Image: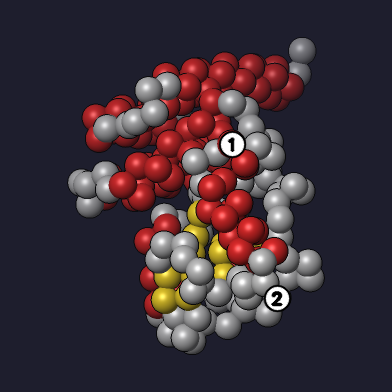
Amino acid sequence: MDNKFYNRVGGDRISSRQIDELIGLARGLAADGTINKAEVEFLQKWLAANAEISNQPIIRTLYRRVNEILDDGVLDSDEHSELLDTLNSFSNRDFELGEVLKPTTLPLCDPAPTLTFSGRQYCFTGTFNFGQRKHCERAIADRGGAAGNLTQKADVLVIGAYATESWKHSSFGGKIVKATAWRDRGLPISIVTESHWVRFL
């Protein structure tokens, strides 16, 4: 048998087992609805030891996010909820491993609007390829805008790339439902995807 073929098939089998193990780990970490710094450190060690599966986009994002969280030594409330969302999506297999989810059921503006930043108020929800929420908010501030909690004064709600088909039941779904209701009542709030937002940076 061709050694290259054997190694590839063997590698695929190992990768699949590791992904199953990571799904089990994610399910265990997210089961009680909270995650502490020691659990994040354990997840970081596991991901570092299994780096060969990090060619999968969501696993790469998860590894980067865990490293960013531990970089300052503090697990703040935004990081906590973002990481839980990601782990829940992962443990429910609510994603395709090889690609960012297609937000087919999300109530996005159609057509998607041209985005500007100066004097505009942004809100972010979900898990982002761009980085942690604070990095997204800094990108807005650097361009003269503001970012924070969802209020009726918000101009744009940006939904992270890893929003799932079951977004209404996720912890970030409440913001999407609220923004949609406001938009339906005539408030001028735009709802866009992360990929659309990034095009204007």
Q: What residue sits 34% from the left and 31% below the top?
A: 34
- Disc 2 residue type (three-letter): Pro
Answer whether residue 52 is visible to the viewer in this image. Answer: no
Disc 1 versus disc 2: distance between alpha carbons?
Answer: 26 Å
- Disc 2 secondary structure class: loop
> Is 101 left, or right, of 128 in this rendering?
right
Q: Single out the residue that lies furthest toward the front.
A: 185
Of the residues under marks 1 and 2, which one precedes in the sequence?
A: 2
Q: Position of residue 108 (x, y in %)?
A: 71, 60
User: What is the tally of numbered marks visible in this picture?
Assistant: 2
Q: What residue sits 37% from the left and 23% below the top?
A: 32
Here the colouring is secondary structure
- Disc 1 residue type (three-letter): His
- Disc 1 secondary structure class: helix
Q: Nearer the viewer, residue 153 or 46?
A: 153
Q: Are marks 1 and 2 in contact (CB under 8 Å)?
A: no
Query: Pointer 1: what residue?
Result: 169
Above or below 124: residue 62: above
Q: Position of residue 118 (x, y in %)?
A: 49, 86
Q: What residue sits 22% from the left and 47% below the top?
A: 74
Answer whether residue 177 is visible to the viewer in this image. Answer: yes
Q: Nearer the viewer, residue 19 or 92?
A: 92
Q: Nearer the viewer, residue 8 or 46?
A: 46
Position of the C terminus, as image quadrant, is: bottom right
The tag on residue 56 is: none
Query: Pointer 2: what residue?
Result: 113
Above or below 148: residue 103: above
> Would you call the spot at circle 2 few (<14 residues within 10 Å), some (14-19), or many (20 or more)?
few
